[in-house]
Image: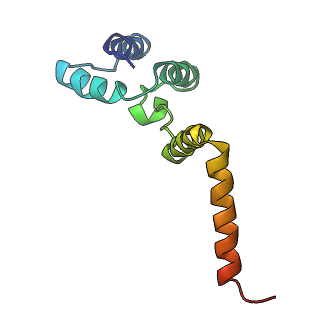
Amino acid sequence: MMQKEAVEILETISEFYPTFELTKRKAKVLISHLLLMDYEGVKNNLIIYIAKSPYAPKLSDIAVYPPEPNMHLEKWKKWEEEAKKVPEEVKQNFREQFDKLLKEISPNE
């Protein structure tokens, strides 16, 4: 969320809840938290909240955080891209060496 969007969220709360007192100090703290959130998600939650409650929301009532990237998936994709660059003969040689090693360490069948 951008600063302008965070201010818009707080202004919306103030407009719908006249008893919601927004001091400079309170705005600074709330904006610092809102900046970490997803604007569209918070806006949608606020609209739903306004329709249901006569009391001003707490941040936890309307909070929506953007999804965190899946680092394992990112690593996997990177490995797949790197694997595409390896020549097929190198892969085949590796498979043969690996099969040979497995036969050496496997119990006799």
- Which residue extends farthest left? 25
Left or right: 72, with 14 as reference point: right
Residue at x-position 48% and y-position 24%: 42
- Vertical relation: 16 (above or below) 42: above
Left or right: 38, with 83 as reference point: left
Name the quarter where the C terminus is drawn: bottom right
- Relative depth, front residue between 26 and 16: 26
**In x, y percent, where is residue 56?**
42, 25
- Which residue extends farthest right? 109
Residue at x-position 28% and y-position 20%: 21
Total marks drawn? 0
- Relative depth, front residue between 93 and 33: 93
**Is residue 58 visible to the viewer in this orientation of the structure?**
no
- Vertical relation: 12 (above or below) 32: above
Name the quarter where the N terminus is drawn: top left
The picture quadrant where one finds residue 25 is top left
The picture quadrant where one finds residue 86 is top right
**Is residue 31 visible to the viewer in this orientation of the structure?**
yes
**In x, y percent, where is residue 76?**
56, 45
Left or right: 32, with 24 as reference point: right
**In x, y percent, where is residue 96?**
69, 63
The picture quadrant where one finds residue 94 is bottom right
Left or right: 95, with 11 as reference point: right
**In x, y percent, where is residue 90?**
61, 50
Way the structure is coloured: rainbow
Residue at x-position 65% and y-position 83%: 105
